[in-house]
Amino acid sequence: MRRSRLKKREYSTLSDINIANLVDVVLVLLIIFMISAPLLQSGIEVKLPQTKAAAVTEQAEGIVLTLDAKGGVYINDVFANPKDFESKMKKALEVKNTQTVYLRADSMVYYGQAIDLISRLKEIGITDIGLVTAHNEKAKN
């Protein structure tokens, strides 16, 4: 009998949209992206030696080998352990299907470290090695 006395509730559709929650979510996402964007910068900080030579304007195909000021070696911006350097270099050459290597070395790196790295590349069989430098604007005559 109780059931017969209870009235069924009627629900109506809500036609208004509350955008306050949507704005909150969007603002939180905006803040997250603003904080994380600078952290996503790729590359190793290297101060290249400056020369009078003209800078290359076109993007050349090849593997970029970076030698930072502390002596760390990076293959395409990925750290390479000195013990595994040869195997990682061969794998990178196979993936890119090239025999060209561009060496970016910090200006504070000892000459012997760069020459040692070049000799290890030659042992692998790479003969096309380019040295990357920065263009010196003050040296123009």
Image (spheres, grey):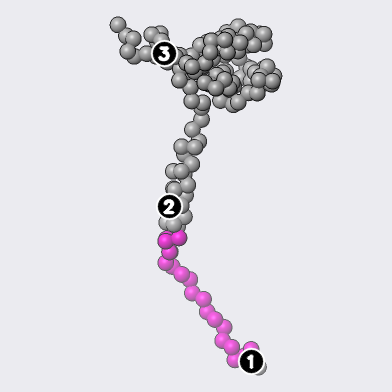
Residue at figure coordinates x 61%, y 19% from the top left = 96
- Mark 1: amino acid: Arg
Q: Is residue 121 magenta?
A: no
Question: What residue sits right under mark 2 in the picture?
Answer: 27
In the image, which is nearer the foreground, mark 1 or mark 3? 3
Residue at figure coordinates x 51%, y 30% from the top left = 42
**Dot 1, how many residues are within 10 Å of its Cα: few (below 14), some (14-19), or many (20+)?**
few
- Mark 2: amino acid: Leu
Q: Does 116 sit left or right of 83 as displayed?
A: left
Q: Which residues are magenta?
A: 2-21
| Res 95 seen here | no
Sequence-first disc among 2 and 1:
1
Please say if the residues under marks 1 and 3 sit with CB atoms less than 8 Å apart. no
Closer to the camera in the image, 47 or 22: 47
Q: Does 31 sit left or right of 71 as displayed?
A: left
Question: What residue sits right under mark 3 in the picture?
Answer: 50
Q: Position of residue 140 (x, y in %)?
A: 32, 9
Spatial separation of the CA atoms under disc 1 and disc 3: 92 Å
Q: Position of residue 20 (x, y in %)?
A: 42, 61
**Dot 2, how many residues are within 10 Å of its Cα: few (below 14), some (14-19), or many (20+)?**
few
- Tell me the element at label 3: strand
| As drawn, 51 above or below 28 | above
Which residue is farthest bottom? 1
Spatial separation of the CA atoms under disc 3 and disc 2: 44 Å
Sequence-first disc among 3 and 2:
2
- Tell me the element at label 2: helix
- Mark 3: amino acid: Gln
Residue at figure coordinates x 60%, y 26% from the top left = 79
Question: What residue sits right under mark 1 in the picture?
Answer: 2
